[in-house]
Amino acid sequence: MLRRLGLLGLTLVIAFAAGAQSSDPLPFLKPRDIILFQGDSITDGGRWRAGSDFNHIMGQDYAYVLAAEIGATTPQRQLVFLNRGISGDRVPDLLARWQTDTLDLHPQLLSILVGVNDLMGEGPRTVTPEQYEAGYDKLLSQTVAMLPGIRIVLCQPFILPVGKRKESFSVLMPEMKKYQAAVDRLGVKYDLPVVHFQAAFDAAIQLAPPEHWSWDGIHPTYAGHGLMAREWLKTVDAFYGSH
């Protein structure tokens, strides 16, 4: 078991050495700063909600990979990583819990990934692209007003042609682009970095089939989460390194 963990750690270090732009990730953060990941099941990653077992509080996902590597690379800063992703959440769900799960935590860096459930919702759970953008805009306006100086990262939602999504991909993808475009517009409006996960996955499936990166077209595999972590860190370091 220890040997397997050692190989995993080595793999993560090699992956980040290849993908990150700096050996000192997120240099703009100060000691004990809080990095908060918000979103749906892709961010949730099966995390444990209660207790202090640090094996499980970040879930098994890109947020965990980032926390593991950045925490190991910058131990002198003792950065604090929090995950408040909840499976099934849409923008309206984030709005309902934003005060307690985001604003009250006073993060210095906030990462948001939401949108696939807004698109995939049925009946009353459907959130149109217009509703999605308006609600997302409200989240951001509340955040910058209540937490001056906070750095925010917007992550585009994405889908891949895998499983149930394979047959309907030609219909779903044009709709998903509307939600992705909304995130891009909000990035411009608030001068925020946008992590283009869809483009990263589109490029990745030229190297390996979509099933290597996602097991159902929505949720990434371990390789998919590793790809997301590298893309996230590259984007955030490049943007905030120049701001």
Image (tube, helix red, strand yellow):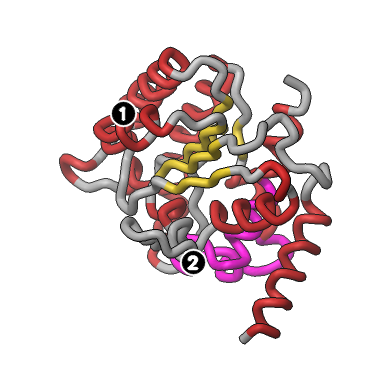
Q: CA distance from mark 2 to mark 1?
A: 27 Å
| Image: magenta residue range | 205-231
The residue located at (69%, 58%) in the rendering is 204
The residue located at (46%, 60%) in the rendering is 59
Instruction: From the top left corner, tell me how far across and down residue 145 is, in percent.
Output: 43, 13
Which corner quadrant holds the C terminus? top right
Taking the magenta stretch, the answer to whether it contains residue 178 is no
Question: Compared with residue 203, is residue 222 higher up or lower down, i.e. above or below?
Answer: below
Q: In the image, 14: left or right of 109?
A: right
Instruction: From the top left corner, tell me how far across and down residue 210 is, in percent.
Output: 58, 65
Q: Amino acid at mark 2?
A: Asn
Residue 105 occupies quadrant: top left
Q: In the rendered image, which residue does mark 2 sit on?
A: 55
SS category of the residue bearing label 1:
helix
The residue located at (43%, 21%) in the rendering is 143
Mark before the other along the chain sequence, 2 or 1? 2
Question: Compared with residue 106, is residue 177 higher up or lower down, i.e. above or below?
Answer: below
Task: Report the front residue among 113 and 11.
Answer: 11
The residue located at (61%, 86%) in the rendering is 1
Residue 165 occupies quadrant: bottom left
Residue 167 in view (yes/no) = no
